Amino acid sequence: MFRTALNGLKANKLRFTLTALSVVLGVAFVAGSFVFTDTINARFENLFTDVYAGVDATVRPDEEAFGAESPYLEESILAAVTEVDGVETAAGAVAGFAQLIDADGVPIGGQGPPTLGFSWVEEPRLNLLRIEESNGRAPGTAGEIAIDIATAEGNDLSVGDEIEVQTINGAETFTIVGLANFGTEDNLAGATITAFELGEAQRLFDMLGKLSSIDVIAEEGISREKLVETLAAAAPEWVEVVTGDQQTQEEIDEFTEGLGFLNTALLAFAGVAVFVGAFVIQNTFRITVAQRIRELALLRAVGATGAQVTRMVLIEAAALAVIASAVGVVAGLGVAELIKTGMDAVGIGVPDGPLTVMPRTVVVAMGVGVIVTLVSAVIPARRAAAIPPVAAMSEPGARTTRKSLRTRTIVGSGLTALGAVSMAGGLMLENGASLAMVSLGAVGLFLGFSILAPLLAGPVARLLSAPLRGITGKLARENTIRQPRRTASTASALMIGVALVAFVSIFAASVKASVGDNIDGSFPADLSFTSTNLTIGVSPAAVTELEEVDEFDAVSGVHTGHFTIDGQELNVAGVDPVTITDVYSVGASTELAALENGMMVVESTMTENAWVVGDVITVDYEAIGEVATEIVGTFEDQNFGNYLISEETFAANIGDDQISIAFVRLRDGVTLEEGKATAEAALAEFPNISVDTKAEYIAGAEVQVDQLVALFSGLLGLALVIALLGIANTLALSIVERTREIGLLRAVGMGRRQIRSMIRLEAIVIALFGALLGMLIGSAIGFGVVSSLADDGLGSFTLPGSQLAVWLVAAAMAGVLASIGPARKAAKLDVLKAISHE
């Protein structure tokens, strides 16, 4: 049977090549995701290890001892460290926020990777940065800086140029005296790096007389562990001493954790691609088994058992899976390079070096490809085993029996009903189980519609093909209707991809509508102020500048941070109870002055936790520990979190430098244009702060949502490509099955152009059928998810009709594209050979 199975593969190269492409694409994305993340982790591990190679120990403040205050070391500790036995040399450094501003006043960087400021370390063995002789020199006095080479090259900057640098206290002009590498690289993952002379850095970062850390080199013969032990014994209790190895590993762990979401996201989309590919694989094997009824029956007639026939089909599937998965793993190397190129394009640089292919990557990727293919081939294999030997003497057919459709009706209707009930039940709940039940219902709808698709294929295909005229249109209609299971299976792959794209589009449109509604209802302020730099909020110094402007009647900032309740990290906002009501409406149940004695909780969270006003909750602040806090009221607005405390409480327990947004109300008689111009002039030293009207703020939020939609749709495009391969595969297989029929059509006068048109129309009908089902399911899921999140501020369900129409047209065009190869093949069939085909 093994040899027979391999001969079957050789005899049907085209049909199995198209099927193998589905496996290759899915496996390539899985392998590429692992290869990329393993590669980036290995490269940055090597980079950080090299950079910190000279550091034997690091002395740093124990953050827990400082509470909400920014941790620091007194500069006098450096002299004490230098005197400790076993220390050869030590150097202190400070770090903070520093953002370059180009000649047009536009901030450089900050939209992704951070903008970092460092003090220059004179000891080369302890300096993270390197400057080659041809790239200038280190900053040696006030007014001088060195920047990383990648930032200089990307913004046409060179040694001798003057440029503004913004810190937390405003912008000043500096002269570039050097271009630096980070270790052996031109850049640190896209971060903008600016280095200052130590005293200048301390002034700019409000660290006069203070240090962020002290790095130490041990005397020859002194181990790192011994050095740390000696330093720890001599240091105050609020100082922490770690080895250079520990410091290096912490930096690596922090970096890899920051990129961990990327691997998760890539694998999620790879899973979608593999799932869609499973439909294509199952459909291909089912059709090929139906086309080989006579061949398989002959095997049974000459003595092959049903189990042997089953094994033969599974051997074919296994051989296909192994070859395609191996190709997919190799293709994954290319996918990893493509992802790296994409990262470079958005400014996240990856160090150069070889790709890292771990054994786990090969095992997992190959395993996914083989298992999915074998599972997809099980049902067709069992069907092959059930073919009676007498079928060898009859004309093969693949008519769907009433019994199978009856079973499908029962099972599919049951799953659809269960999904609908689960989704409806989730919508009626008012606690955390709502989204979970809606998600469970969505799975039920997916499976139910997939099973019911053959029942819908005939009526829907008849409706979609009704406008088709002429003999080609009629034949295309009949071809899609007479094999409802095949039409449905082919469309199911596309249905899944379109459903996910439709859901993303609907969810995004609903988010934008909800943001607009929420802001319109709670934004009485005239202007808002946000940071364009994702790593830092609005500077308190900038808010102070706004408070001194005569044209402004009220100014208030919103601080955002985190605290923990019952082990769960939660978002919390801090506001000034006196001024916030002039610029923003949180919908509080009582006067905000009550915040001085506790916190307010959003109403839905109160219900979810069965809390009532007056309850005392234990809140765990990372900086100071647990604090018993009374719930003094409720509020409705959830734009900044479900918990609200006073600005004073926030500063004492979390910190006062985390203003995410500030609002301004203009005095009577001051127009929006005048107010905005005045604000921009007042914030001239803070070019990273965006000044927006309400309409501009909403538009900016919508742009961010659109960018995420574009990203998700692009990644889901892989699933759509696999679905289109499925359409092309099915059409190609149907042409083999209909060879004699096509030959007869040619013999009675149908031209090649008409044959191509017929195949093309079939593909369009199948694609539209899958797209319509996908949009129906995606809309249902979108409605359920959006409605279930109404208590979290997402209650404006919006159906983006124009976007969905575009996807429908795109599906029809994709059907045309998928039909090109099969249509050309059908048109080129030799008439006499086709008529005599068995």
Image (cartoon, helix red, strand yellow):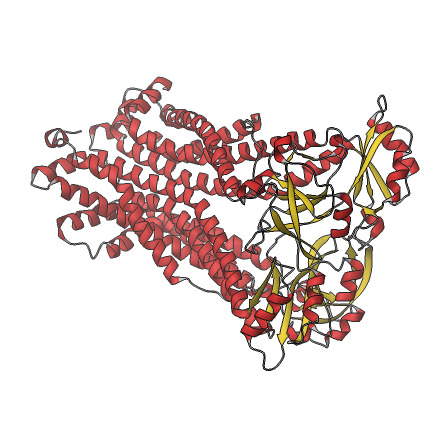
The image shows residue 601, relative to residue 829, as above or below, that is: below
Q: Return the x and y of residue 310 as percentages of the image width and height.
A: 38, 27
Residue 305 versus residue 150: which sits nearer the camera?
A: 150
Residue 716 versus residue 22: which sits nearer the camera?
A: 716
Indicate the quadrant where residue 719 lies.
top left
Residue 441 versus residue 139: which sits nearer the camera?
A: 139
Tell me which residue sits at (21%, 57%) in the image. Answer: 466
Q: Quadrant of the N terminus?
A: top left
Work out whether residue 424 can be spotted. Answer: no
Work out whether residue 471 can be spotted. Answer: yes
Q: Return the x and y of residue 309 as percentages of the image width and height.
A: 35, 25
In screen coordinates, is 209 left or right of 675? Answer: right
The image shows residue 504, relative to residue 56, as above or below, that is: below
Tell me which residue sits at (15%, 54%) in the image. Answer: 469
Tell me which residue sits at (21%, 34%) in the image. Answer: 825
Q: Quadrant of the C terminus?
A: top left
